[in-house]
Image (cartoon, rainbow, N blue to C red):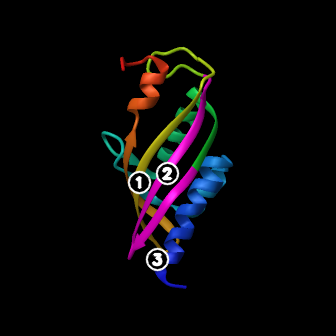
C-alpha cells in the first residue's frame, strides 16, 4: 500500500474513532507526542492538547458526528474537507444552550508520518454556526 493510502487511513481513524466515537485512548496511537495544531494561538501542543480540544467542544456540543467529504493525500500531507453536525447543549461564545442541531464545515491539512499525525492546519467556517446561535448578526 502506498504511503499516501496509509496516511489517509490514519486521518480516517482520527475522524471516526476519536471525533465520532470519542475514544481518547486512540489519541496515544495516532497523534505524535510533539504534535502541533496550528488552529490555535499559540498552537495546540501534544496529545493532551487534542484531549483538551475534545473536552472543550464536548462541554458546548454533544452528538457530534464528522463526515469526511473529500480526502486527498500527497506524500506526508493529507487534506480533508469535512462536515460536522453538533447539538448545542452547553454555553458557547457566551450563548446559553439552545439544543439546536447545527452544522459546521471546514478543511484540515494534516502532516502524517509513521502512522501518526504530526501537525494540523484548519480552516473552519464558523460563520453559519455563530449566526444560527445568534452570537453574531447575519
Q: Which residues are magenta?
A: 67-89
Quadrant of the frame with the C terminus: top left
Q: Residue at x 49, y 75 (%)?
A: 114
Check disc 3 and report its element: helix, strand or loop: helix
Q: Residue at x 52, y 76 (%)?
A: 5
Q: Quadrant of residue 51?
A: top right
Question: In 3D space, how far apart are the residues under numbered discs 2 and 3 (Cα atoms)?
Answer: 18 Å
Name the residue carrying label 2: 82
Quadrant of the frame with the N terminus: bottom right
Q: Residue at x 58, y 54 (%)?
A: 15
Does the magenta-highlighted stretch encompass residue 72?
A: yes
Name the residue carrying label 1: 108
Relative horizontal placement of residue 132, taking residue 125 as reference (left or right)? right
| Whether label 2 touches label 1, CB < 8 Å | yes
Relative horizontal placement of residue 101, taking residue 109 as reference (left or right)? right
Say which of 100 and 5 sits in front.
100
Amino acid at each position: 500500500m502506498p504511503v499516501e493510502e496509509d496516511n489517509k487511513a490514519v486521518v480516517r481513524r482520527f475522524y471516526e474513532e476519536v471525533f465520532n466515537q470519542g475514544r481518547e485512548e486512540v489519541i496515544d496511537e495516532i497523534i505524535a507526542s510533539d504534535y502541533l495544531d496550528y488552529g490555535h494561538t499559540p498552537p495546540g501542543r501534544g496529545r493532551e492538547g487534542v484531549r483538551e480540544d475534545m473536552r472543550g467542544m464536548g462541554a458546548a456540543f454533544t452528538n457530534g458526528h464528522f463526515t469526511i467529504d473529500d480526502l486527498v493525500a500527497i506524500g506526508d500531507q493529507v487534506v480533508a474537507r469535512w462536515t460536522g453536525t453538533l447539538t448545542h447543549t452547553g454555553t458557547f461564545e457566551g450563548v446559553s444552550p439552545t439544543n439546536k442541531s447545527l452544522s459546521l464545515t471546514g478543511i484540515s491539512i494534516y502532516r502524517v508520518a509513521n502512522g501518526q499525525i504530526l501537525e494540523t492546519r484548519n480552516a473552519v467556517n464558523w460563520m453559519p454556526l455563530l449566526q444560527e446561535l445568534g452570537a453574531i448578526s447575519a
